[in-house]
Image (tube, rainbow, N blue to C red):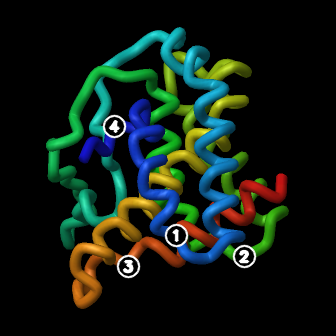
Amino acid sequence: LSWDLRAADSVREYLPLVRNEERRQLAERGLDRFHRLLQQVHALPSQIIHGDLNDENIIVRPDKTLAVIDFGDFCKAPRIIEIAISLAYMLFSSSRNVQNLINEINSILSAFDATSKVPLSQEERALLLPLIAARNCQTVLTAQYRLNLDPTDPYVAISAEPAWSLLTMIDSL
């Protein structure tokens, strides 16, 4: 299984495993939207990215220094993919209000632009929500696949419910 966000379409084969029709359609819409924009993503300049920056892979030491672990998804890809993956996990804990979600994303993007030598382009910004949704599709559909293999594995479902919630909010925009 590839967690490379550019390969999000690879989880489409797991859609039939989602028994809830609304959720299956939600994931399908997210993957369809992503697929339509994939050429634009591939046209963006690439750089080295971690590929899986989330709270499980960032360690904050007692002296407040940071460490990043798990370089298994390290690759060359457009930087907006790194931002989308990180936001997909960061926003799990956001309030369940669409306006707050938008405000949180704008705040994070403003901080990124303020500290980056090259602020995000309008094209990158336009791709952000579909990329976040695609990562959440990867999360929920991979969880469903793994639950089918081992329904007793508690780790599998950790991110699934927050990912479904975030996917629902993005779909409503």
Q: Nearer the viewer, mark 3 or mark 1?
A: 1
The residue under label 3 is 157
The residue under label 1 is 18
Q: Nearer the viewer, residue 113 or 152?
A: 152
Q: Position of residue 173 (x, y in %)?
A: 83, 52
Q: What amino acid type should be assigned to the residue bearing mark 2?
A: Arg
Q: CA distance from mark 4 to mark 1?
A: 22 Å
Q: Nearer the viewer, mark 4 or mark 1?
A: 1
The answer to whether 90 appears left or right of 94 in the picture is left
Q: What amino acid type should be assigned to the residue bearing mark 1?
A: Val
- First in sequence, mark 4 or 3: give its number: 4
Q: Nearer the viewer, residue 165 or 91?
A: 165
Q: Which mark is residue 107?
A: none
Q: SS for tag 3?
A: loop
Q: CA distance from mark 2 to mark 3?
A: 19 Å
The residue under label 2 is 96
Q: Residue at x 32, y 75 (%)?
A: 148
Q: Nearer the viewer, mark 1 or mark 2?
A: 1
- First in sequence, mark 3 or 1: give its number: 1
Q: Residue at x 31, y 45 (%)?
A: 3
Q: Nearer the viewer, residue 21 or 133?
A: 21
Q: Nearer the viewer, mark 2 or mark 4?
A: 4
- First in sequence, mark 1 or 2: give its number: 1
Q: Are marks 2 and 4 in contact (CB under 8 Å)?
A: no
The residue under label 4 is 4
Q: CA distance from mark 3 to mark 1?
A: 13 Å
Q: SS for tag 2?
A: loop
Q: CA distance from mark 1 to mark 2?
A: 23 Å
Q: Residue at x 64, y 68 (%)?
A: 23
Q: Residue at x 72, y 29 (%)?
A: 126
